[in-house]
Amino acid sequence: MIKKLNIFIICFLVIFNISVKSNANDNMDYVIQMKQDILTLMLAYPEYIVGVEKKDNDKVYIIMKSGKKILYDDKLNKTHEQKLENPDLQDMLEQYYPFEKNTNVMDKTFDPGRARQYDLLGEVYGNSKKAIESNLTHLKYGYKNYQFNKKNNANTCLEEVLKELIPLSKNRGDIASILYPPSGTYNYRVISGTGRLSPHSYGIAIDLKSDRKDYWKWCSQEDGSKRVSEYPKELVDAFEKNNFIWGGKWGHFDILHFEYRPEIILKARYFTAFNKNNKWYEGAPVEEETTKNYIDIIEKTLN
């Protein structure tokens, strides 16, 4: 009887130890992810995020230049649709954006960058229609009749895209047929079927020439996949290189849509291939003084 009891105790301790280790590993993974996300945000919005704060209840916030604090993770279990409807910063950055050119539309639950944290967008690009419009400027290259937000280098990044693509389009009919005529940039409106502002409302998105196969509500999965596969890789690459995400890589595909989202691109660029054996910030430009300062802030606050 004693022997059986001892075996039971040993088995219990082994299982309990494995469970504790698993929980510890899960918590370590979460902390690493949080640190990487916050570093990414600080690098993406260097003029607007000035600090990090951890409260006694373990809630973590980024601190904006205005003094506003934005919660990193509300710790709520959400469906995919709920994450789109009311995302925190963790929800917004949860899915890694892929740089590989896809030839089919993605799964419906894969929408990297489609969740937008509106407090953050408002702090950077304007909290009202009037404030946003005061931050708009006409593009100086390519689409000179179109306006884009001048905050956080959004307009200059779009101009860099156009400087690469417009000369290329002179000998590439497939690119020219998508660039001209564009469908628009700034347009203060809500997303159809929701109460959420469109990124076009902030002047940080551009729609290129429209095709009936461009939008998930307009066509079948098969037609959408055909349109995605035909889209020129060089065009998508030029946008991504300048911190724009492509709606063609969403399950709810929006193929004509490109959106200035440096935080989504930088996270994918720096941390997609992260190795857990390395320091949590490996992959980021750690040789730069600004990055070192951000890492120091994060380490002091979250360790």
Image: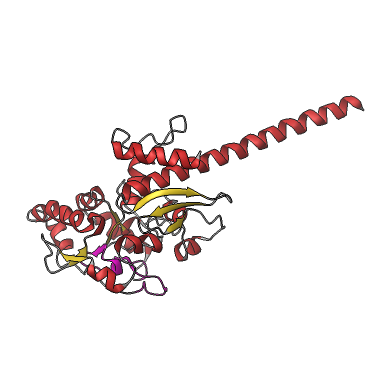
What is the x, y in percent for residue 87? 46, 60
- For the N terminus, which image quadrant? top right
In the displayed structure image, the side of residue 18 where residue 119 appears, left or right: left
Residue that extends furthest to the right in the rendered view of this protein: 1
> Where are the magenta residues, as a range?
190-217
Residue at the location (71% across, 34% down)?
15
Residue 14 in sight from this viewpoint: yes
Nearest the viewer among 90 and 181 is 90
Left or right of 171, for residue 185: right
Count how many numbered circles sit on residues in the image.
Answer: 0
Q: Identify the image quadrant of residue 221.
A: bottom left
Give residue 204's position: percent from left, percent from top: 27, 62
Residue 212 shown in magenta:
yes
Q: Is residue 197 magenta?
A: yes
Residue found at the far top of this picture: 3
Location of residue 247 in the rendering, given as x and y in whole percent from the top left corner: 32, 59
